[in-house]
Image: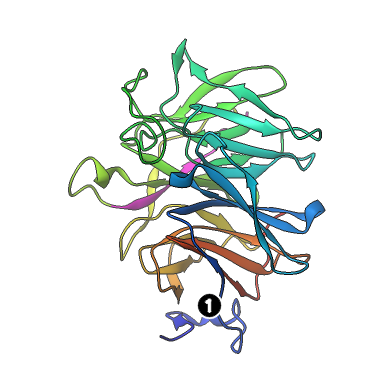
Amino acid sequence: MSTYDILDQRFQALIIGHAKLDRLWTGSRWAEGPVYVPSAKSLLWSDIPNDRVLRFDETDGSVSVFESPCGYHNGHSRDAQGRVIACEHGGRRISRLEPDGRWVGLVERFDGKRFNSPNDVVVKSDGTIWFSDPTYGIDSEYEGHAGPSEIGASNVYRFDPASGALSAVVTDMVKPNGLTFSPDERLLYVAETGATHVPGLPAVIRAYDVAPSGLGVGEGRIFATSPAGFYDGFRVDRSGNIWTSTADAVAVYAPDGALIGRIPVPEIVSNLTFGGPKRNRLYITAQTSLYAIFVNAHGLS
């Protein structure tokens, strides 16, 4: 298997020709939700069916259980204070890891109804927390607790922890999944994985213009259509390129939506994030394993 598929010369500038994909660890049932924690020189990620969060220590390469049980965490992010924000399938809420080690629930209901199972999360520079809420954690007992959707829809929400304000900002998707902002935060990108429930629905990333007020978004448009499987989790680099999961690779898109390259991975890719002291190490969660590769691009934080 080739390390790279170069589809556009712009991708050449983003990779290191002799860098190879490393499998750092294996043993998950479904690896998801990586977040890099600089203060701990560590990566945290979810093993959802096993109801645990795992920790990779960059200093010695060891892997340990960070939290178990954990409420079936899926996606993670960090806020400006470096605190980890988590999407809990089991608790059907967004929670935050405090400095004293406690997980504190931040929000768990919309209009008095419990969320489905928050999936992925990103924190905007103004401190607001944006997260997707499909039903995967309540569809069966495998990644949470089976149950009905009280809301009856799968949306993307904006939560302001300072004021407590909560609003549904994206309501036109079947199963919104991964999400992130462009570097200038003028665009919100959201992955659609609704084909799991509506056969034939295209697997796409949609782009939404963020309102100048920052309180919502405009009408969405298709940014990219997946060549293989679903887009799940993704992140942008400092130049605005999108690095996203697909069934068999990390796919990289230029800001204009062109697919410029791929990094093949021997398992189903679920998610990724940038880490390391220079934010130039791409950590990849894929099915049962954690992978990493050094690239010539840098994450936003």
- Amino acid type of the residue that numbered disc 1 sits on in the rendered structure: Phe
The residue closer to the viewer here, 101 or 97, is: 101
The single residue placed furthest to the bottom in the displayed view is 18
The residue closer to the viewer here, 64 or 230, is: 64
Instruction: Give the crowd class for mark 1: few <14, some 14-19, many >=20 residues within 10 Å.
Output: many
Residue 94 included in the magenta stretch of the image: no
Lateral position of residue 36 relative to residue 196, left or right: right
The residue closer to the viewer here, 25 or 128, is: 25
The single residue placed furthest to the top in the displayed view is 112
106 up-or-down from 203: above or below: above
- Colour setup of the view: rainbow
Place residue 94 in its image quadrant.
Answer: top right
Percent of width and height locating residue 63: 65, 61
Q: Secondary structure at mark 1?
A: helix
Residue positioned 36% across, 31% down in the render? 138
Place residue 84 in its image quadrant.
Answer: top right
53 up-or-down from 248: above or below: above
* Residue 179 visible, this angle: yes
Percent of width and height locating residue 268: 38, 63
Magenta span: 203-213
Lateral position of residue 229 relative to residue 63, left or right: left
Percent of width and height locating residue 172: 34, 33
List the residue tagged with mark 1. Answer: 11
* Residue 256 visible, this angle: no
Residue positioned 55% across, 78% down in the render? 21
